[in-house]
Amino acid sequence: MDTQQAAGTSVLPADPGALTPAEARAAFRSGLAVPTAGWSRGFAQANLIIVPRDLAFDVLLFAQRNPKPCPVLGVLDAGETSGPLLAGGDIRTDVPRYTVYRDGQKVDEPTDIRQYWRDDLVTFIVGCSFTFESALREGGISIAHIDQNVNVPMYRTEVRCEPAGSMAGPLVVSMRPVPASQVADAVRITSRYPAVHGAPVHVGNPHELGIADLARPDFGDPVDMPEGHVPVFWACGVTPQAAVMESRPALAIGHAPGHMLITDARDSQYLVP
Amino acid sequence: MDTQQAAGTSVLPADPGALTPAEARAAFRSGLAVPTAGWSRGFAQANLIIVPRDLAFDVLLFAQRNPKPCPVLGVLDAGETSGPLLAGGDIRTDVPRYTVYRDGQKVDEPTDIRQYWRDDLVTFIVGCSFTFESALREGGISIAHIDQNVNVPMYRTEVRCEPAGSMAGPLVVSMRPVPASQVADAVRITSRYPAVHGAPVHVGNPHELGIADLARPDFGDPVDMPEGHVPVFWACGVTPQAAVMESRPALAIGHAPGHMLITDARDSQYLVP
């Protein structure tokens, strides 16, 4: 980190993939607000959902009942702002951009949530499919949103999650175009990462998921779908935020889609044999 | 089931392994109270921990932080007495024997908990290592406690679990003697069942776990340790009960060790590739 960034001028690093997680979090703490795909190569990125303590059981149970979209990597106790997944960090400042919901309505997308913080807030750190993207690339599968330098496209589906208490909502998916000849490889590689969404939930037919138009994602950006490529859909950690929008708690905070927490855990920690 | 059992005379079936889960649960509902190892071959057995709603987040978070001893297979909402893992069953009667704790002290070991039931009780159904015993036997590894027709030996260790809120306690393990030549097979086979405790937590040295004498288990029965066999230890679903004993909630209910809920889930559902 150079002193300019430390002072908050939010300069995009020359090679974000080479930053340590602590350096990346410092860049975001200083105000940089960009999607994180490709940042801190080899380290796991994560979704956030932060709720008051009285909703925490419902959220954790929702995650237990919907492990593909909501694989919980860690939980910070009520009021805690740091933990082993972000050593020396601060969950209120270290994510590039947040989404704040009041009564299920998005009311703010700040780069810092200190003004919203309360001592009864419980933070859930949820696995993210960015974690297996390095493995996909090592397997020879290119990642369109990284190559095109945009945010991953995400879609609200018509598939319903298992509800839990007050939490109910649709499955949200991320999509990556994969050449037909590499779909089996993409399934095989990602199925070895069950803690970060694992194998795809659907291959090939967006209409079956209730997605009308791939070119109009509900979150993130559209990507080109080259001839001979198949849309492959993975469960997405924005799912708990979609449930928050339905369940309308007085306050809930998530990351902004694609703008993840970069953790100190290595991608390889979530690889199963 | 013959009519005698249905009437509550608690006759031990000739071949408990051949019973369907519903038949096994009916036998226990009628009052039969025996350990369940070897019952309903091919179907997953489970540990229970039942707590008031105000402790439910701590228990679920304890499980999330200690997934090896506490793999959650299902959760019944507050007051619910049945669910998809025990279709048509009743969690208050269908386990052969329960353990009731008040303020952390064991106060009863009934075969039925209807007298203790409250509408705010939340039931956690937790994976059990009996689930992978069929796979071990198919792999040519004999199971001492089944062959010797006793309850599996379980031990409180000096290893501490990650605490969660009010829940803190020691890791409890089950032990199976395995011939030295088959230890690697036992590890390989059980590691494919992460949802039911998975790979062993320790192989070979009980003293390192703080177990003074294998012949004196804390729960269950001792088994013979033949020459050339190695004690292999797996995380055990009695662990949350040990935490309940420490955290002393006003009321908590578990199964009696070794006396499991027999679920409608097949063992194979918990097998990963």
Image (cartoon, coloured by chain):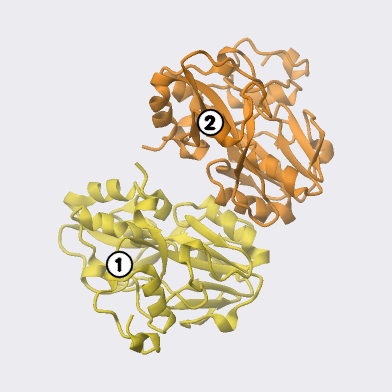
Chain colours: A yellow, B orange
Residue closest to the far top: B14
Residue drawn at point x = 53 percent, y = 80 percent: A113
Quadrant of the rendered image containing residue A163: bottom right
- The reply to whether callout 2 and callout 1 are in contact (CB within 8 Å) is no
- Residue B200 lies, in percent from the top left, at 48, 34
Residue drawn at point x = 50 percent, y = 62 percent: A84
Residue drawn at point x = 31 percent, y = 62 percent: A175
The quarter of the rendered structure image containing the C terminus of chain A is top left
| Amino acid type for the residue under numbered disc 1 | Leu
Residue closest to the far left: A227
A139 vs A245, left or right, is: left
Q: Say if labels 2 and 1 share a chain.
A: no
- As drawn, A189 above or below A119: above
Q: Nearer the viewer, mark 2 or mark 1?
A: 2
- As drawn, B211 above or below A49: above
- Residue A65 lies, in percent from the top left, at 54, 50
The quarter of the rendered structure image containing the N terminus of chain A is bottom left
Residue B212 marker: none
Look at the numbered disc 1 and give the secondary structure of its residue: loop
B52 vs B194, left or right, is: right
Dot 2: chain letter:
B
Which is more toward the observer, B23 or B232? B232
Number of numbered discs on residues: 2
Residue B233 marker: 2
Dot 1: chain letter:
A
| Amino acid type for the residue under numbered disc 2 | Phe
- As drawn, B208 above or below A243: above
Q: Which residue is mark 1?
A: A214
- Residue A68 lies, in percent from the top left, at 44, 52
Alpha-carbon neighbours of circle 2 within 10 Å: few (<14), some, or many (≥20)?
A: many
Q: CA distance from mark 2 to mark 1?
A: 50 Å
B157 vs A88, left or right, is: right
